[in-house]
Amino acid sequence: MDHEQRDPHEPPALEERSDAWLVGRARELLAIIQVSPVNERVWHTDEVDRLLAEAQHRGEPRMVGQLLRSAVAVRVVNNELADSAEPLLDELLAHTRRHGLVVLQADAHALRGRRLLLAGAEDAALTEAAVALAMLDEDITPDVLLGGRSWDMIMAATLMDIGIVLTQLGVYEVADQVMSRANKCIRASAGPHLISVHLINRARLLVGWGLRLERIGEDERAAERFATAAAIAVAVEAPFRESLFPREPHLAAADQNPVIGAALALAQPSGAHVDRLRRLTDSPRYPRELVIVSIALARCLEHEGHEEEAVHVLGQARSRMYHEAAEPTLRLCLIREYARLSGPDGGERTTSALENYATELEAQLWDMRESRIATLNTRREHERLSRMHGAIARQALQDPLTGLPNRRALDERLEALARTPANHPLAIALVDLDGFKGVNDRMSHAEGDDVLRVVASTLRDALRGSDMVARYGGDEFIVLLPGAPLHAAEAALRRAVNAVAGLPPDLSHGVTLSIGVVSLRPQETAVRALARADAAMYQAKRGGGNDIVAITATAAAESERAATENDQPARSGDPAWVLPETT
């Protein structure tokens, strides 16, 4: 029978694409959707969802985490799709907690903050930012399975998401600190796109900060912020040309991005910017960009003596922003600019009264800003202390090297599982590393520790969420598989054996797994069950390692009878415990 041949010019199907391609394509779609017309955003979001479905089918936790983050991010940048982000946010938080992906978990809180801002829930958004910051205040060990460059990019993206929330809340000082921290990650590993995103966000922060400073009469400090934003607008030109943003190659970044165009104009208002800013106000943009570019255009028109047209531009922007819940701080800047240029209808007395009212209003708003910073710091410290308390509690039950449960936690979990009938059959496996001693002898104990961490993570990721992997000591691990018949437990553990055997040599240094697995018998003690699993593991080692030996209750009973008849007590490692393999 002839097999249908695929057109060589047809793009490969998703299942044929690499993991890195899926992550990279999602990042590209996030860039596209931010400059797409409203009617096209749904198409791009659907494609991100298909990428996520493929990642979930493959099951690699870090890739799934990054694709979940992309699926959330493409929604929270769009008012029309924001409601559909909530279930994905819950899924992202649950996934990152389960797999210990702390940085992506912090990003989930930041993205929830952005979602809350769209609904006008500023206080709740501030709490989410505080939680995210507290998580990143911890001493986080880079994930070796991600690689240095990917780790830096994920950390930078998370910090930028937090910075965006704080910028929209008007907490510019803290946002500036967070963006500076992101810059360190970007300098180390980022490509042109992430550099462009960072510079645009940084310019956006400085422009908003400058406008806010003007409202309290700090014109000199505001001018400094505008000048720095303009310098960034010049610096972004080269990376923008190589970014993932859809763009016209013959146009400068300032002609295509409202924040960049406005930054240049606010630093030096003049008629040279007017045509560019007019085009940018007509393009489909987000409310925050509309405010910034409208104020910049109005100042350039005012500089050229066209005050009436400037008032018209601001009035149109004010009307379009009327129902927007997001960014009240920036919206107030627009209203103030409109009032300043509109001129009084009631003469000098009216002007004086309005100025006095505005002064009182600004003083109260400035106090609110100070209060907001204090609230942020208080909640951040509260979250840090809460997490520290939780960490201390976890450390009592956690192996410090691998992060897995320790023997104390294992004993508690095994006892709880054994006394609950719903967890039976209960499979118990003892895992030992083949060739681990050679790693320590040939290299160093530090290299050995890295191998233990990588193997522990791989073993954990290969099993179900309900399974428990604990470090038993040295290079031995115990796995509890509740509700798993012996054949199902063996199949699951076979995945773990293959996953470790398939690790890159520079991560595993050739280490493999030998596993013995048994099913807990009625009335059997944990010590006895572990002894049987230990004996099965030694049988796997004697067969050359990189294998599993499963012992049924029948085979174990026959072996024990034989040992009793020969007056040879059965014990772990004793030759009397060499039992037939059952698959």
Image (cartoon, rainbow, N blue to C red):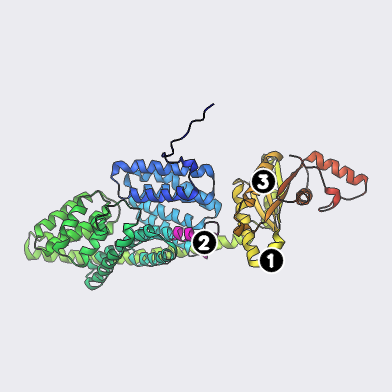
What residue is shown with label 3?
493
- Position of the C terminus, as image quadrant, is top right
Q: Are marks 2 and 1 in contact (CB under 8 Å)?
A: no
What residue is shown with label 2?
386
* Residue 3 numbered mark, or none: none
Residue 510 falls left or right of residue 274: right
Q: Residues within 10 Å of mark 1 (few under 14, many from 20)?
A: few
Magenta stretch bounds: 138-155
Q: From where the camera sits, is residue 282 visible?
A: yes
- Residue extending furthest top? 1
Q: Nearer the viewer, residue 225 or 137?
A: 225
Upstream in sequence: badge 1 or badge 3: 1
Mark 1 lies on a secondary structure that is: helix
Upstream in sequence: badge 2 or badge 1: 2
Question: How far apart, in angstroms, are the residues tagged by discs 2 and 3?
Answer: 36 Å
Q: Amino acid at mark 2?
A: Ser
Determine the residue positioned at 35% across, 40% down.
43
Which mark lies nearer to you, 2 or 3? Answer: 3
What residue is shown with label 1?
442
Relative to 53, does residue 299 appear above or below in the rendering?
A: below
Q: Position of residue 403 (x, y in %)?
A: 61, 59
- Position of the N terminus, as image quadrant, is top right
Q: Nearer the viewer, residue 330 or 2?
A: 2
Residue 293 falls left or right of residue 151: left
